[in-house]
Amino acid sequence: MILNSQKRLSSAIVLVLTAGMLAVSTLPCTGQETKPDPAGVVTGDRTSAVDAGGNSFVVPDPTDKTAPDYAQKKKDSDEYKAQAAKEPLAVKLADTVGHVRVATNFAWTLNTGYLVLFMQAGFALLTCGLVRKKNAGHLMMLNFAAYVFAFLAYYAVGYAFQFGAIAVNAAPGNIGGVPTLDHFLLGKGLWGFLGGKGFFMTGPAYDASSNVLALFEVVFMETAGYIIVGSICERITFWSFLLCELFIGAILYPVFGCWVWGGGWMSQLGNTMGLGHGYVDFAGSTVVHATGGICAMALSIILGPRLGKFGPDGKPRPFPAHNLVYVVTGTFILLFGWMGFNPGSTLGATDLRISVVAINTNLAAISGSATAMLFWYWKFGKPDVTMACNGMLAGLVAITAPCAFVSPTSAFIIGILAGLVVCLGVLFNENVTKIDDPCGAISVHGFCGLLGGICLGLFADGTYGAGWNGVGAASYLGQAGKGVTGLFYGDTKQFLVQVIGASICAAWAFGATFVFFKTVNAVKSMRVSKEVEEEGLDVPEFGLGAYPEDAVHAA
Amino acid sequence: MKKIEAIIQPHKLDAVKEALIGIGVEGITISEVRGHGRQKGHTETYRGAEYTVDLLPKVKVEIFVPDARVESIVAALSSAARSGKIGDGKIFISSIDEAVRIRNDERGEGVL
C-alpha cells in the first residue's frame, strides 16, 4: 500500500513538472514589457544611486498634476535636468555608483541567504536530538526531504505566486527593483491576491535581480517547511510528509507571503483603509514562523498524539530527548543562521539599520532563553535544557517581525514575553489541549510568531521605515521622516492592523491545512501502523536505523 | 573456581579496577546495565511532565577466581566500591564447574 502511494505520488510530481515547464516555455511574450537582465549588465544605474536618507540622485518628473506640491516637484525635476545636461560626467559617475550599490546589496542578500540555508542543519540537529533514538534516522530524512521537495514546489509555482507581482507595489529598490515581475494572477492594483509571473523561474524571472530575491526567499520558505517536522515526527508516513512539503511550498506559504511581502492586499491596507503602514512583518514572525507553526498544529491534530503520549487518565507522559548535544548545537546553529534571517531582510547592506537589527535579534534571543530557564527553575526546581533552547528560539521568532522597528530595550522585553509564552504554551498543549508536539514547534513558532506580529504593533518606535508600504513618505503622524509606529508610540491603527493581520495568518494557516489534510487523511491514513510506530520508523520507512551498531546484528 | 559478580555505581569502576589489579586479579569483564534495588529510583520532570527514573545506570563487574582467593578479592572489591550511601550495589558469588581457554583448549584453574 505504502509503495503504491509512493509510486503514484512520484509519477504525479514528474507529470506536473514536465507539463508545467512545457506550458510555460511556449507562452507568448506580449506587449511592451521590461526585458529581464539575465547577465546582470543593465541592473543598477543612476536611478539606483541614493544617499543615506534614501534621496535619489535622479529627480523624476512628478506624475500627479493635482498634487499640492506638484509645482515644487516639477521645479526640482527641471533643476536636476538642467544640472545633468551641464555635467554629463557626474551622470556617468552616478551610473557607476548605482551599479555598485546594487552589487553591494546583491552580495549582502545572497550571503545572508546562505546563512539562512544553514539553519536547515540546525533544525535537523535540534529536532533529531529531541526525539527518541529509534526515530533519529526518520527525523534526519524528514529534514532533508523538506528542503528538496518544498524547493521543488516553490520553484515550479510558489515563487511566482508569492512574488509574481512584486514590482506593482513592493519593488525592492535595494536589489534593482525586479521590474519584470509585475502581474497579479488574482486581483490588481492595491488589491492583489496572487502573483502571476515567473513560473518555473523562467521568462521574466530569468533575471539577475529576480534571482537574488528567489534565492533569499526560497530559504525563508524552507524555514516554514521544516518547522512542521517538530510536531508531526515519530508517526507520519513519508509519502504524506512529501505531500505536506509540496503543499507548503506551492500554496500555503506563497499565498500569505504574497499578501504581506509580494505587494498584496494586506501590505496595502495603509493605502486602502488608512490602517497605519498596512500589515507589516519585517522578517517573518507571521509570514514564515506562525504560518509553519500553526500549520504544524493543524497537522498534529489530524495525526493525533504518539502512542502512549497520554495515559488512560489523560496525563502526559514524557519521551525524553535522546541527545541534548544535538539539541544545543542545533539551537546555536539556528541563532547563527538568524543573523542572516533578520538583518538580511533589509535586502541591502546599504540600509545601515542592519546593525540595530542584529543587536535586537541577539537581545531577544538571550532574554527569551533566560526567561525560560528561570521560569523552569522556579516552577520545577531544575532548568530544563530543552526548554532553555526553546526559549532562545521563542525570543528569536518573536523579534523577527519587529526587529527593524524597535529599540534594543523593546527587543529585550519582547524576548521576555516570548520566553513566558513558550513555557506556558508547552504546558498548555501538554495539559489542556493534549496536542502532541514533540519538539515544541507549535509554541515556539506558532504562538511566538503571532506574538511577534502583535509586538510590532505595540513597540515600533517610529525611527525606521518612513514610507513603508508606500505610506507617509513625506511625513507621518505630522512628522517628517516618521516611520512605522506602534501603540505605545501613538499609532493605534498600526496596532489594530497588526492584530488583524496576525489573526488572518492563524486562520489561513490553520484553515487551509486542516481542510486539505483532513481530506487526504480521510482517503488514506497519513499515520504509520501501530507496529511501525512501536518499532521506530527508521527501519520500516527507510531500511536503516540511525545507529545500526547499537544492537548486535546477525550478519 | 568461583564467579564474583558485583553490581556497582558506574563512578566507582575506576577505584574497583585499581583495587583488583592491585591484588593481582588477571582478568575482568564489565558491562553497562540498568536496574534498581529497594530504593526504586526517583522522579524527574521533562518539559513539564513528571516521570520516574526507576532503572538507574549501573556497572556489572564479573571476575573468575580460584576458590582460595575469593575472600580477599571480595574484601578489596567491597571496600573500593563503598561510599556508604544507598545504591552502592551488591556482590554475588557462585561456583563454576569448568573453564576453557579458547586459544589452546587448556582447562582448569590455570585458565584464570
Image (cartoon, grey):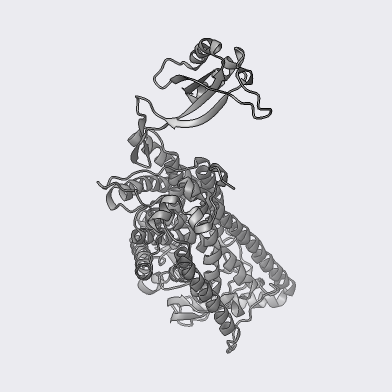
Return the residue found at the far left: A313
Outermost residue, right side = A89
Q: Residue A420 is drawn in which quadrant?
A: top left
Relative to A19, does residue A440 appear above or below in the rendering? above
As drawn, is A44 to the left or to the right of A304? right
Q: Position of residue A223 (x, y in %)?
A: 50, 59
Could you say where residue B106 lies in the image, as x and y percent from the top left? 65, 24
A163 left or right, relative to A503 = right
Q: Residue A139 location in percent, x, y? A: 50, 53
Along the viewing direction, whichever of A290 and A131 lies nearer the viewer: A131
Q: Residue at x 43, y 20 (%)?
A: B90
Image-quadrant location for residue A216: bottom right
Image quadrant for the N terminus of chain A? bottom left
Q: Is B47 situated above or below A405?
A: above
Q: Tally the marks.
A: 0
Say if residue A553 shows up in the picture: yes
